[in-house]
Amino acid sequence: MKLEYFVAIIVILFAAQFFYGAAANPDSEFGGADGAAGDYVAENFGYEPFVPWFQKYLFEPPGGETESLLFALQAAFGAIVIGYTFGYYKGKGQGN
């Protein structure tokens, strides 16, 4: 029973820290390290990003919502495959 309380306290502290950070910086943009590093290199070293020649032939989603949907479907499909694999080998191990 002590472990459940300990985990609950850690989860509450993590959530409180997240919401405090978001409330303390309301107009900040939480960008990733990849974007910041690319911007830094472009500004300081004059690097121009490479654009592949086949870029015009690739599918580009019509909006951010569609891109989010495709990413969520990809994540769900990956989770199903991984879950099935683990379940298969767990059941195979118990069947012996």
Image: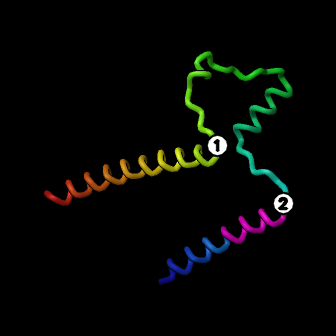
Count of numbered marks: 2
Measuring from the top left, give residue 55's x and y in whole percent.
61, 22
Gap in angstroms between the C-alphas marked 2 and 1: 27 Å
Q: Nearer the viewer, residue 78 or 20?
A: 78
Q: Residue at x 84, y 64 (%)?
A: 24
Q: Residues within 10 Å of mark 1 (few under 14, many from 20)?
A: few
Give me the residue at 75% from left, 35% from top: 37
In the rendered image, which quarter is residue 25 located in?
Answer: bottom right
Amino acid type at image mark 2? Asn
Tell which residue pokes out farthest to the left in this image.
96
- Few, some or many C-alpha atoms within 10 Å of disc 2 (few <14, some 14-19, many ≥20)? few
Q: Is 27 in front, or is 16?
A: 27
- Identify the element where label 2 is drawn: loop
State which region is magenta: 14-24
* Residue 9 located left or right of residue 91: right
- Residue drawn where x is 67% and y is 69% of the image: 15
**Height in image: 91 above or below 20?**
above
View extreme (bottom): residue: 1
Which residue position holds label 2? 25
- Label 1 secondary element: loop
Three-letter code for the amino acid on which mark 1 is drawn: Gly
Query: Is 43 contained in the magenta span?
Result: no
Which residue is rendered at x = 80% and y = 26% of the image? 42
Mark before the other along the chain sequence, 2 or 1: 2
| Magenta stretch: includes residue 20 | yes
Q: Nearer the viewer, mark 2 or mark 1?
A: 1
Q: Nearer the viewer, residue 28 or 15?
A: 28
Q: Find the residue positioned furthest to the top.
A: 53
Whether the residues at callouts 2 and 1 have beta carbons within 8 Å, the answer is no
Residue that numbered label 1 is attached to: 63
